[in-house]
Amino acid sequence: MIYLFWVKTYDYPGTLNMAVDVAIGELAHDVFLRFYTWQRPTLSLGKHQDGLDLDKDYIKMNGLDVVRRPSGGRAVLHWDELTYSVVIPNTHDLFNTKVLELYNLLSGIIVDGLNDIGYPVKIVEGHRKPVSSVCFQVPSIYEVALDDVKVIGSAQTRTQKYILQHGSIVLIPHEEIKQCFTNTKHLDIPLIGLYSYFERSIDEIADAIKNSFERYFGRSMELKNSQFDEILNRANEMEGMFVWKK
């Protein structure tokens, strides 16, 4: 019996990345793990962010894409990172897990995988209130840090059919995130990435995390191309939902 399906999809446009996460939620009947990267540097806004403090001139001048996430949270600049997403269908026992409990569980699985290949990341137990629109300003409870600096920023959304949690695993941090908003340009935002320690390929990092998920969920299988076509077709239909309305 298969308990976990997984797939890697690299270099997708930002709106398609968001649509694929939601399409998986709509179509998956098992726990689903996805790893992906972004075609261009892309700023994603949480579904409740109004974007009124965006520096639109800076974003346009520097050729950054902007998308709307299906999840909450604050803005993330997706650039030199590996992104993960996990879908829990309503048929799974974890579907009834409370928000913070699930954050803690999934963060622990990811931490174990990264520890396996030598990255000394850990879960942050405390909580500090953010004061800006930027996700990586401070770590929230049960998020993942490296040298006490947030290195993975995650967000979650829940529907009657599924829970989606996705997050940015920073490889190389970019100070440009501070320039994307009018009120963060001089803000002290500590930034760090896994490559601040040493480099492993994206596939090595993804495989280490996948192996950790297998230890928790059991036997896994990579999704076949024919199976992913159904998800991709559905995502193409929904892609427009995640275009940021300027």
Image (tube, rainbow, N blue to C red):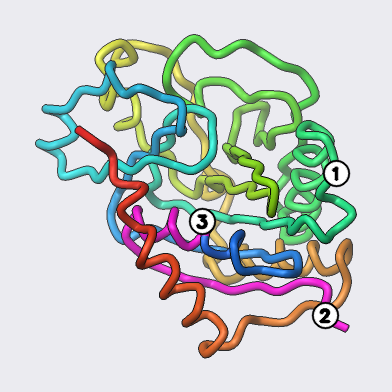
Residue at 81 percent of width and 49 percent of height: 95
Q: Label 1, label 3: how many angstroms apart (C-alpha)?
A: 28 Å
Numbered disc total: 3
The residue wearing badge 2 is: 2
Q: Residue at x 82, y 35 (%)?
A: 98
Residues rendered magenta in the picture: 1-22
Q: Of marks 3 and 2, which one's residue comes earlier in the chain? A: 2
Task: Say if 36 sits above or below 180 in the image.
Answer: below
Pinpoint residue 207: horizontal percent, then vertical percent: 67, 70
The local secondary structure at tag 1 comes to helix
* Residue on which the image places disc 1: 96
Q: Indicate the secondary structure of the residue bearing disc 3.
A: strand
Dot 2, how many residues are within 10 Å of its Cα: few (below 14), some (14-19), or many (20+)? few
Q: Position of residue 92 (x, y in %)?
A: 84, 59
The residue nearer to you, when weighing 71 against 220, is 71
Q: Please rate how many residues cluster around mark 1, counting C-alpha atoms within 10 Å: few if below 14, some from 14 to 19, many from 20.
A: few
Type of the residue with mark 1: Asn
Seen at 59% across and 87% down, the residue is 224
Residue type pointed to by label 2: Ile
- The alpha-carbon separation of the residues under discs 1 and 2 comes to 21 Å
Q: Is residue 13 magenta?
A: yes
- Asked if labels 2 and 3 touch by Cβ distance under 8 angstroms, the answer is no
Residue at label 3? 82
Pick out the residue farthest to the front. Answer: 160
The N terminus: image quadrant: bottom right
Q: Residues within 10 Å of mark 3 (few under 14, many from 20)?
A: many
Tell whether 55 sits left or right of 91.
Answer: left
